[in-house]
Image: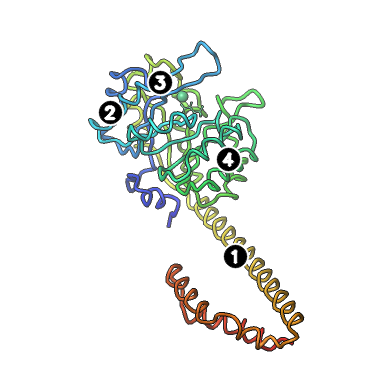
Amino acid sequence: MNTAFDSLSQWGLKTFSGCPFLIAGPCSAESREQVLATAQALAPQPLSLFRAGVWKPHTLAEGFAGAGNVALEWLQEAKELSGLPLAIEIDRPAHLEEVLNAGVDVLWLGARTTVNPFAVEELAQALRGIDTPIFIKNPITPDLGAWVAACERLRSNGVKKLGVILRGFVNRRPSKWRYDPEWELLQKFRQIFPELPYICDPSHIAGDASMVFSVCQEAMNRNFQGLMIETHYDPSKALSDVAQQLNPKQLEALLDKLVLNNPQFQAEDERNSLSRLKQKIDQLDVRLLEALGARHALASQISQITGKQGGELAESGDDAQLRTKIKAFAQRHNMSEAYLFEFFDIIMRQTKSMS
Ligand code: PEP
Ligand code: MN
């Protein structure tokens, strides 16, 4: 059972059995021709989403900054022609309306957004009530706390369809990677959110097309549910991230070679999910006990004021109203009415016996 993978299809996204959840497309949307040519070349492959950067703030101010809003029209056209659903980076609330109007199916927060709590909070508030799945890339610096906080911010603003993208972290030491995957840090993060779908972005980790496959394979071994691979119909002409993009044929060959799912990591994820769920039940049990204690204290106060036995106190409560509430609650939560009545009967009996 792979529940994180199942979540993706439950969210209404396309998945292909025997394939990772695959997001592919160019680093940047550069021109109408480039977007359409790349989407059409990718259409026959098992793609769940077609990606392209629309707004591209780069480290160097003179780098290609993306085509901006006009690219949304190219992407809409690409979706119509190829049938591929769309994923793009959302960088600020002001862009949200036009992105959703363009029929974008999935949004992601980039590494330079996740690192900034102000930006995440603004986006999280703007995303309230929006049902579109959101993927969150790791922050560009290896800051576990910032990554966790970003996920929590999105969740506490009501984002339910949440996934994660590992794109690597700035290197602290000389490295063969463009951005270090920091697999150990990922494992710590994953223990906190074992139930989320995990996507690996090998392109930004590797920084070089020749190393993309090995990162993909490592991600599959580590039981990632998906891959986001930068793909351009002609990478040599790309205006950004030239060295790391694959062409559609190379992507096809990579998928053919990939060996899926390592049972060891799958079992570890299931164990983490179970222990996280058990932990939550333990926390709820403590809250239940606290609520019972608080109720008991109030009942004692009332019997002290009135000098009456708890029995009379219980009878003075609106029993009929409580029974109606219990019935509605049981229905809403698909719980047994009999069980809830029995539970409250025990509480009431205890109150009646108080003096
Ligand atoms: C991208 O996916 O093209 C991109 C800019 O990503 P990141 O936020 O990982 O740098
Ligand atoms: Mn890129």
Residue marked by disc 3: 68
Disc 3/disc 4 C-alpha distance (Å)? 25 Å
> Which three-letter amino acid code belongs to the residue tagged 2?
Ala
Residue 120, image quadrant: top right
Q: Earlier in the sequence, mark 3 or mark 2?
A: 3
Q: Earlier in the sequence, mark 3 or mark 1?
A: 3
Disc 4/disc 2 C-alpha distance (Å)? 31 Å
Q: Is residue 85 left or right of residue 64?
A: left
**How far across and down, in percent of the image, does residue 313 sit?**
65, 84
Query: Are dots 3 and 2 in contact, CB under 8 Å?
Result: no
Query: Are dots 4 and 2 in contact, CB under 8 Å?
Result: no
**How far across and down, in percent of the image, does residue 40 sit?**
25, 28
Q: Is residue 75 left or right of residue 186?
A: left
Q: Image point 59% across, 65% down: which residue?
A: 281
The reply to whether residue 218 is in sight is: no
Q: Within 10 angstroms of label 2, few (less than 14), some, or many (20 or more) residues? A: many
Where disc 2 sits, the SS reads helix
Q: Image point 54% across, 31% down: which residue?
A: 111
> Which three-letter amino acid code belongs to the residue tagged 1?
Ile
Disc 2/disc 1 C-alpha distance (Å)? 46 Å
Q: Indicate yes or no: mark 4 CB to ligand 1 under 8 Å.
A: no
Residue 236's tag is none
Residue marked by disc 1: 281
Q: Earlier in the sequence, mark 4 or mark 2?
A: 2
Residue marked by disc 4: 150
Residue marked by disc 2: 78
Where disc 4 sits, the SS reads helix
